[in-house]
Each structure stands twice: as structure tokens, then as C-alpha cells.
Image (tube, rainbow, N blue to C red):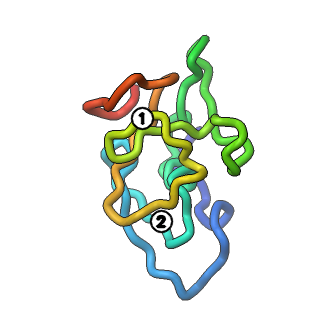
Amino acid sequence: MTGPATPALLRRAKADTVAFMVTVDGLPVQVHPGDSVAVAVLCAGGKPYRRAVLGDAPRAPYCMMGACFECLVQVDGVPNRQGCLVPARPGMRIVRQNGLNAGPQEGPAE
């Protein structure tokens, strides 16, 4: 992935919602009510969503409904959360992860 994703393609179109901020890998990202953590990470853009457990291949959400487990991230210090199933909340701290994390990380995934 290069550059930020186009948020309009990733969320329901609602003109009356008020955006709020979360952090993804320590950087602020604007999201809207109804957006999932996976959408927040995709909106952050930049690097791959996560890395595979075996082979370090770049991975990204596939199904966006909790079946494929390609959206695993750390949310507020809790690893291996399915980003597509977790609603984004103001102030949430999201960290991309490499493979399956055994526990909380101190900083962003490399």
C-alpha cells in the first residue's frame, strides 16, 4: 500500500456524522461513527495492514465480516483483535501487528 486510502470508498456515506480521532501506529487517523478498526487502519494507509505468521508476506482484510482473520491488530494493548469486528471509538490506540502476537507490544509493528 502506498499513501492514504480513499476514505469515501471504505465507509457508508452519511453526511450527518461527526468524525473523531483514533491512533494507528501512533499517528492520528480520522474516522466516523460506524467505522470499524479495520477501516481505520486502511484509512491510515502507508504500509501493509499486517504481516503473515509464516513467510512475512503482506496481508490485508479480505472478507470484512470476521471469517478470514486477515484483519488481526492490537487494540488498546490487546493483541489479535479482529479489526473488522471491532467498532472504532474515540481515542482508541490501534497497532498493526506482525503475525500472531503473544501479548501486548510497546510500540508499532515494524
Q: Where residue 2 appears, x then y in whole percent?
A: 56, 41
Q: Quadrant of residue 72?
A: top right
Nearest the viewer among 47 and 85 is 85
Q: Residue furthest top?
A: 55
Query: Element under label 2?
Result: strand
Q: Amino acid at mark 1?
A: Pro
Q: Are marks 1 and 2 in contact (CB under 8 Å)?
A: no
Q: Can you see residue 43?
A: no
> How many C-alpha atoms fall within 10 Å of the one at disc 2: few (<14), some, or many (≥20)?
many
Q: Is residue 61 above or below residue 59?
A: below
Whether 11 is drawn above or below 25: the answer is below
Residue 74, image x and y in percent?
42, 39
Quadrant housing the N terminus:
top right
Q: Foreground: 44 or 22?
A: 22
Of labels 1 and 2, earlier in sequence is 2
Instruction: Say what amino acid the circle numbered 2 marks.
Output: Val
Residue located 61% across and 20% down the image: 57
